[in-house]
Image (cartoon, helix red, strand yellow):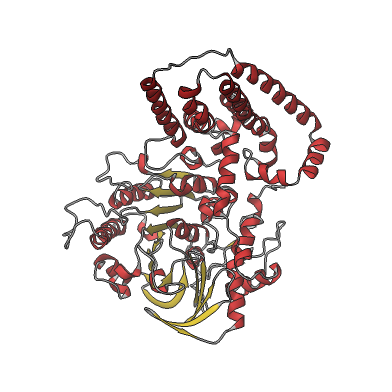
Amino acid sequence: MFNLSRLGLVLWQWQRVRQHRILPLWIGGLRIDLATIGKLIAPSLLFAPWFDANETAQMINAIWLCIASLFILIPEVSSAQFIMEYDTRPNRLFVDYLKHPQEVMGMLWKGFKAILIIGSLAVVLLMWGAFYLFKGPVVALGSDVIWWQIVQFFVGVALTVLMIRGTLQHRPINPSTVAYCGDSMLNTLPLNSLYSVYYAVYSIKNERSAKDAYENMPEEQVYALVNEAAGIVQVVDNALNIPSFHQQVASKSSTKSKNIVLIVQESLGAQYIGGLGGQNLSPNFDRLMQEGWAFKKCYATGTRSVRGLEAVSSGFAPTLSDAVVRLTKSQSRFFTLAQLLNQRGYRSSFIYGGESHFDNMRSYFLGNGFNELYDRESFTNPVFEGTWGVSDEDMFAKLHEVLMDDLETPKLSLAFTVTNHTPWEYPSGRITPVGEPASVENSVRYVDWCIGQFFEKAKKSPYWDNTLFLIVADHDSRVWGQTLVPLKHFHIPALILGGGVEPNMDERIISQLDLPVTLLSLAGVSANHPMIGHDLTKAGTGGRAMMQYNDNYGYLQGDVLTVLQPKLPATQMRYTAPESYEPIPADEHLQRLARAHAIWPTLMYEKGLYTLPELHIKKG
């Protein structure tokens, strides 16, 4: 049933399917189908050795398999119409509609009467056939020998576990595993519609609402406060009424489109960077700080890699919910730099030494404008391969290769490293380890060596003068502290360098959100977009940062930290680096500002407003 339905959808969408390789679609579809079937047949397979000859058990089994078939059939029969409406397989919206059965049935009956009748008849006929198929003759197919029953049982356990996980690797299969191209609808074809709906519902647990956790406020007040803090004077008219959609006029000009390279360093907190007052582990980065625009007080938006990737690639603010990289509503038509720059002739690539389906990165980036993806499987003969993927020097080699290819076409490249992560694995012979080789300190030494090697090569390359490089950490290696938001461990390195970038030691407090906006200005790109970060090339900007730490939300303005906790009054304190927090009297304006910034991303995500109007397709 799954394959016949998928074949029909492929033939129907052939004009889009034919533009990409078709084999990954079918292989991915087989894996997802086996995972789905594994969940549905697990009770039958595991009980069979013990109740095979029992007539009641056989009848219960037949009924269960019919119900399972119904779970398969209803969303699958609905797939074509759902794709026509929403350009994706049935997803969370399919279940959300069930909350309003009267309205939905009225809509279906009035607008899709023929399809509803045909689909219902098809389900009834298939269910009738399924019952007689599964009911079958009441016969015993197994054995009464206990040791053989035990063997059958454990073989059944092994089969179901393997089917459900879908892989022998340490991360189970998910939609990102089978995403294979830059067309977000086509990336849903390897899925089946039951799996698509199930995974969307499963992912709801990641979507917590800041409106419910913190003191709520009127939407218009939220938008007004956030726009004011972002320096958005006038919102550009747009059909979607995107509240932060504005025109950014670049402060620089360029006769040729510049490459923009975002290098996101895994777990590289400021505590490891000598030039930021940390340990003396980064001589190469410290030297580069003297050559480029170094931000001495940059703060991460969270404690997870996906949070940093979210901020740097899309400029989206942190929230109590999970990062949008992992959420269902942001897997397509969600604003990223790639969505914007592709319209200006850029090639956009995501380069990662690990498995890109981890944390749903493959699906998110391919679905939102990054049309080239290089991950662990893309590296042939890597210098070193550890638990998390190939080494940073392998990743930098791939980045250099991408930048050297077709020098006339501008490129946006997001390169994400993996080495600086437990269990601290790296190739030997690059650094002289101090103490235990497998330590975060030695891992940082190796990471710094890789940065130095890459930029020595980049400076001699033909792309150097026309490229802007950003080096920034996603977060610190371990965020902890005996305070509501331990700011010391949100402090991260951030550095912009490349052809034409003047040396500057910037002392302003900034957020990761400010970096993509600033890069557009340095590249000479004037554009309309919804990002709320500051353009740091302009006077009067910076001075604030925001971050999510577990359930607590921190808003730092100047030296005042405002912390929101679920269902509790806001707390405010004066912060002095590195770890001094002095309680201060309440500043109601700052508390409103913090609440507005905590609620804003929830509203933008839930309403589908963080996008470009020209990319948006009405979702109903």
> What is the x, y in percent for residue 503?
36, 73
Q: Is residue 143 left or right of residue 604?
A: left
Of residues 380 and 407, the one drawn nearer to the viewer in this rendering: 380
Which residue is most to the right? Answer: 110
Compared to residue 619, the image places residue 162 above or below, namely: above
Which quadrant would the N terminus be assigned to in this image?
top right
Q: Which quadrant of the figure has residue 132?
A: top right
Of residues 440 and 297, the one drawn nearer to the viewer in this rendering: 440
> What is the x, y in percent for residue 159?
42, 28
Question: Can residue 232 be seen in the rendering of this structure?
Answer: no
Residue displayed at 29% across by 68% down = 272
Compared to residue 545, the image places residue 335 above or below, namely: above
> What is the x, y in percent for residue 402?
38, 47
Question: Can residue 412 be seen in the rendering of this structure?
Answer: yes
Compared to residue 125, the image places residue 253 above or below, namely: below
Compared to residue 322, the image places residue 17 above or below, namely: above
Total numbered labels placed on residues in the image: 0
Residue displayed at 51% across by 48% down = 364
Q: Is residue 575 left or right of residue 437?
A: right
Of residues 167 and 457, the one drawn nearer to the viewer in this rendering: 167
Of residues 372 and 271, the one drawn nearer to the viewer in this rendering: 271
